Amino acid sequence: QQTSAMPAVLDVLLELTRLVPDEAWAGQVSISAGRIRLSGEAKAASELLAQLSQSAVFSDPRFEAPLTQNPKSGHERFVISLAIGNGNAP
């Protein structure tokens, strides 16, 4: 049985799909201990982080590693983690 404090994995993936822009992608997504971790590339990773911070499903977005640039695509490589839940749940 799912509790209201933790959304279903499908809901988490749906929210990520809604928030991540078309020009960004995540090659690796992992969920562990109430956090989601995304590794991938975006034109502007800081804009992606700002977009993720607008979610009602996630909280505490942060970079887990320094940004690097892919010389072939010109995009920024990122590792972002997010808490699942709005941080206001009891």
Image (spheres, rainbow, N blue to C red):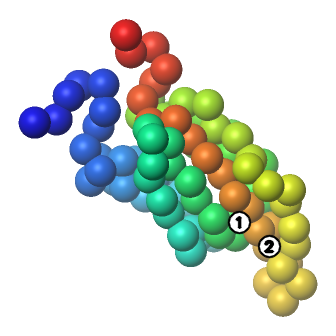
Query: Is the Cβ of the residue at disc 1 closer than 8 Å to that at disc 2?
Result: yes
Graded by Cα atoms within 10 Å as few (under 14), some (14 to 19) or many (20 or more), the crowding at tag 2 reads some
Residue 7 horizontal/vertical position (percent): 29, 37
User: Mark number for residue 28?
Assistant: none
Q: Quadrant of residue 13?
A: bottom left
Q: Which residue is situated farthest in the bottom direction here? A: 72
Q: Is residue 24 visible?
A: no
User: Mark number for residue 75?
Assistant: 2
Secondary element at tag 2? loop
Name the residue nearer the viewer: 4 or 52: 4
* Quadrant location, the C terminus: top left
Residue 53 horizontal/vertical position (percent): 60, 35
Who comes first in sequence, dot 1 or dot 2? 1
Residue 34 horizontal/vertical position (percent): 44, 38
Tag 2: amino acid: His
Residue 45 horizontal/vertical position (percent): 75, 56
Secondary element at tag 1? strand
